[in-house]
Amino acid sequence: MLCPHHAPCNVKCPICLDVIRANGPVPPIKFYQAVKAVISTEESKTQKINMTFDVNEFERSVLAYEPASGKVKPCQLKAVCVDSMGRQFANVSYFWSYHEMKSLGYSDFGSEAVDRDHELYEQMECDWIKLGDIKGGTYTVCCARDEFKKRMLMSELPAGNNKNHPTKFCRTKFFRTTMERAEERTIVKVSNGKGASYDKLMLEAGIW
């Protein structure tokens, strides 16, 4: 949530007050294509590691806690920024497994066969999280089921760097609020912060 009228926030503006209460980034905001962060791993809260995240690494997913499930889940990285208070944020959309989708009440899996062990579904809605809330990284490749199987057999999948979150694939998006099927997942590249691809990414992140 951002106020379209004020940067920095105006405490007399109700929208600005909602921005502050939401505990997300407070404008003015500076966006970056990539950022290096010191994070605590999922396995050990005391172990700190340096990780670099780049919004152009489309198939590399960040791992972060999802509030509703309380689980560490892979996420699509939409944007990284620093707000007016010097806090570092990431904008992400969460991936859900087939079994989680069933438990949420989703039923529109389409006519194609579903890979219940390796297929994920990306929610359209995005959330702001602090970089310190990221717990690691993995890969969620963008391809069809048969292509994933072929790449797996040929040992051509990127190696996930987290044993609890191996490489999986996602081809479908859905609306978390309505549990309806959305568009197919396609690879989006940022081009120097300008152009249609960048605008599409910012729209999905709820920034424009």
Image (cartoon, helix red, strand yellow):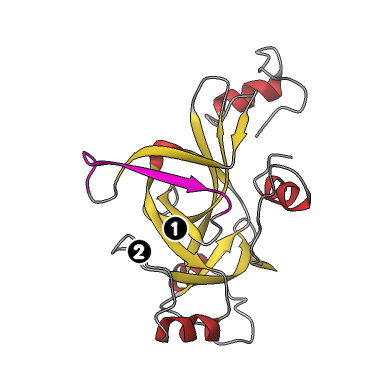
Please state, as top left, top right, bottom left or bottom right, where the N terminus lies in the image: top right
- Marks 2 & 1, CB-CB < 8 Å contact: yes
| Nearer to us in this view, 169 or 123 | 169
Marks 2 and 1, the one that precedes in the sequence: 1
Task: Give the labeled residue for mark 1.
Answer: 74
Q: Residue at x 64, y 81 (%)?
A: 110
Kindly identify the amino acid type of the residue bearing the numbered disc 2. Answer: His
Q: Is residue 38 above or below residue 77?
A: above
Please state, as top left, top right, bottom left or bottom right, where the C terminus lies in the image: top right
Image coords of residue 70 (percent x, y): 37, 51
Q: Residue at x 68, y 14 (%)?
A: 10
- Which labelled disc corresponds to residue 165? 2
Image coords of residue 31 (percent x, y): 61, 34
| Nearer to us in this view, 196 or 67 | 196
Image coords of residue 161 (percent x, y): 33, 60
Q: Residue 54 colored magenta?
A: yes
Q: Residue 142 colored magenta?
A: no
- Crowd around label 2: few <14 · some 14–19 · many ≥20 (10 Å): some
Q: Residue at x 68, y 50 (%)?
A: 201
Image coords of residue 168 (percent x, y): 44, 71
Q: Is residue 155 above or below residue 94?
A: below
Q: Which residues are magenta?
A: 44-56
- Crowd around label 1: few <14 · some 14–19 · many ≥20 (10 Å): many
Quadrant of the image occupied by residue 19: top right
Quadrant of the image occupied by residue 49: top left
Quadrant of the image occupied by residue 79: top right
Residue at the farthest front position? 192
Q: What is the secondary structure assignment of the residue under circle 2?
A: loop
